[in-house]
Amino acid sequence: MEMEFGETDPILSSPFRWKNKSLTASPTVGVLHPRNLDAENVARMRHEQVDVLDQMNKMELWAKSVERRSLELTKTNRQLRSAVDKAKKDVEHQRAKAERQAELAVAAELARTAAEEEARRLRAKFARSDKGTALLKAARLKMELETCREKLAAAEAGLKDQELKVEAVKGEAKALREVIQQQRPQTARSELDSEPDQAACSLREQLAGAERRCWEAEAKLAQLPDLERRCGEAEAKLVQLPDLERRCQEAEQKLMCAEQRCGEAEERLRALDLQVEQMAEAQREAEHRASAQAQELAAAQERAAALSEECTELQQQLAVADRDRHMLIEADRDHERGNQAAWHDLSARLAQTEERASVAEKELCFQVQATESLQGSVDTLAAERESLQQRCRVLEADTARTTTEHLEALERLMEEGAQARAQADAANSRLTAAEAELQSFRAAAADGSAAAALTAAAERAAAAAAEAAELRRQLEDNRAAAAAAAEAAAADAAEVRRRLDAAVAEAAGAAATRDAALMDVQASRARCLSLEADLHAARDAQAIQAAELAKRCEEKNELQMKLEESAACSIDALSAARSEAAALHKELVESKQALCTAAAQLADTQERLRTAEGTARETAVQLGSAQEKCSRLERQVAEATQREVELEEALAEAQGAAEEHSGNEQIHLEQSVAQAQQIIALNAQLQEASGQLREAARQREEAAAQLAETAAQRERLDAELAAAAGEITHFRRQEYEHEEKVTALLQQLYGARDRLADAEAELAAMRDENIQLCGENAGMCLELENAQESIASVLSQRAAAEADTENARAAAGREISALTARAEELAAHLEAACAENATLSARLKELASDNTSLQEVGGARCDALTKHLEVNRAEKEALAARCDELAADMAALHDDLATAERRCNAAEASADAIAQASEEARAALEADVAQLRADLDASARQVAGLQSAAAASDARCAHLAADLEAMTARLVETVSEAEASSLPILSTCLTVDNSCR
């Protein structure tokens, strides 16, 4: 049977209360006496026992209900405490999360601003370095173009002069052939017809022509006073004619070797032409690829324009979304203010409930302490009960021992009384006999009988008196012993009664403490009822507040749904923009790959140019050696011609010897004509080679122009890429701002953890993309610098190749001039064979003047080439210094990028540390909460155990009280029986005493 909290306690309403009815005041003490043991008292005792059992049962039920209510109270307190702790944890978690998100946002903003500053600084350095290199490149190209134009103009002028000279030599050779063809029939006719007149006429004509030429030669050689000296030397050297012929043959052999080497040089030039054609083909392919890349970039620009239009549309949509969001923010602020007011009210009520809960906890602790004290008192009572039971057992043993002693004493007294009665009977009989004798003696004395009989009777009377005195003394001793035994029994009975009274008083004190404990329990029950009423009121208030919060949560959910819709729209727009940015990034990567392939092809072409320039250098070296050999041969031929001139002068002086050697000289002239034709063919080949070289130079200039165009296109592409990157960064900045606004809005709402995590992931991804873009920009800078260095090296190599080609051209020009000089010398030799020595000397003078002019021109060109080499060296040194500066700038850029990466890593590490610390704090709080819950459960279990122990102790106390009552009843019965058994003894003792008296 259980009681509800609203019902009245039957113990409180019962007229029988433990506090007002103790064992001392109970009629049971009087009833226990055997004189009062009648049926009415027994019925009343039984009725009281039934009432006591009913009250004990009711107390047990009330204790169980109190225990159940205390468990419910502890459970509700635990639930309230857990709810309060959970609310506090949620608030702390939300606050920590908001602080963490704010810190992460600040760190991300700082990292983003630092990355943007680094990107702007890198872009500025990149633009500055590009401008410097472009200016240096433009100045160097202008200087190279001017020098190339000057060289081409000088080469064209030299080639025109050489062509004019060759045409003149060709005309003179034709005239000499005509003269020789005219002389052959005349000499044949002079030999056949032996007509000296015709020979004389022809000789006169020849002499006239020779005189005319001599006049021209004298006019030309007016400035040559050393002609006579040379003629004398020629006359002196006529003796060395066979040696000169041998040397001429050797010179012809060397000339043939030189022609072979010239053929090899032509083959090498053809190979160079093929390589140049291959390079031109590669350049055309590069142009085609560059045009394809330009088309792709144009398509990318179109897509970028479309993307910009879409961005404008998205910005408009974002503006509309911003307006809607501002409206929603205002509404949310209003709701937030209402929620804050409700939250303050709820927090105040929660504070009140917490205070009440703390008061209830304190009271519960007080109750626990009270129960613990009650448990201690119950334990002490149990110990006292045990001691009382032990003392009762001792008293029972003592009473049993005293009763046995009393019985033994009574039996011994009864035996002694029987013996005394027998003795008294014998004494009485003797007394009667003595009285009879005394009467007889008195009668005899009255009669005056004999004195002997009197003496005998007196003796007998004395003996009987002595015996009677002895018997009287024994009776006194027996009486004294019985009185002592009775006094001892009375003392023992009084001690037993005193002990029983003490036990009864102790039982009454235990009952009084139990009554006090019951009153405390009733007071605690009343406090629990008041606390339960407060809890019900708090629950009602919480229910009302929960209903209000549910309404506001519904309104906030509606607003949140609207915000989520706007956020979804913005996220869709952002995803579309990100996809477009990814497509643009992919196209940029493809264009970078195409640029890398073009750079690789350019490197291949540069390698081929290097190989071609090496072969050109080798051919130039070989041409230089051939030119030196040709110059040596020319000197030898000049000496031979001088000797031939001297020999011809000697032959002119001695015509007879000339007629004898006319056939040999005619053969020699034919050979010389054939050599002149070979030289003319070689000159034509050299002219063709020079034309091919000019064509190769023109192709190289075209290639340089195409390279400049590709460089300009690349710069334009870089500028476009920089503009696209700026637009992308601006769009990303707008995205960042929009996301920050969205995150700022979402941070104020509940249940936005996943979205914030996604935003953090997107921020990390964008940070990685920004770092990747910085790395790609740095890579592009490195690629551009490498390309600039390669272009500079190609231009320097091209300048060196042009210098080598110019050297080759100069060598070819010198060789051509040497060959033309050789042709002129051969023509002079032919004219000397047909004309006089003066014309030959004039021709030789002209050749000498031409050689001096050519030497001057060669010296001037050598000076120009040395100046050009010095300029190239200065440019190379400037380029090396610029490369060092660029390397230093790149090192600084790498250091800045490293610092930026370190900062990003430090920010990420700090964010990870903060997250880990928050997780650790959260785990610690959860562990503390679990520990507190375990402690509360343990305390609840302890309270339940104490309550069960209290109930068990109450049961044990009731059982002990029943045992004590039974023991007291048994003791009273034994005392009454002892008193009843001692009454006959006392009566016998009194009778004996009286009889003795």
Image (cartoon, rainbow, N blue to C red):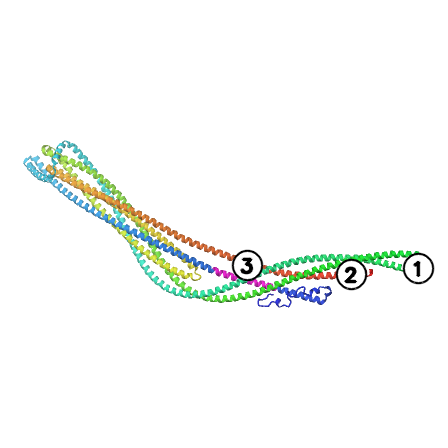
Label 3 to label 1: alpha-carbon separation: 114 Å
Residue at the image position 38 percent from the left and 64 percent from the top? 326
Residue type, mark 3 in image: Asp
Q: Mark 1 points at which residue?
A: 445
CB within 8 Å, label 2 to label 3: no
Q: Mark 3 points at which residue?
A: 937
For this view, does 42 lie left or right of residue 217?
A: right
Residue 437: image location, x then y, percent: 90, 59
How many marks on residues?
3
User: Is residue 139 in sight in this rendering?
Assistant: yes
Task: Indicate which disc, 2 or 3, sits on the residue closer to the N terminus.
Answer: 3
**Stretch of the chain drawn in magenta:** 61-89
Tag 1, which secondary structure?
helix
Looking at the image, which is closer to me, 230 or 993?
993
Of tags 3 and 1, which is closer to the observer?
Answer: 1
Residue 699: image location, x then y, percent: 23, 48
Quadrant of the image for the C terminus?
Answer: bottom right
Confirm whether the magenta stretch covers residue 79: yes
Residue type, mark 1 in image: Ala
Q: Mark 2 points at which residue?
A: 986
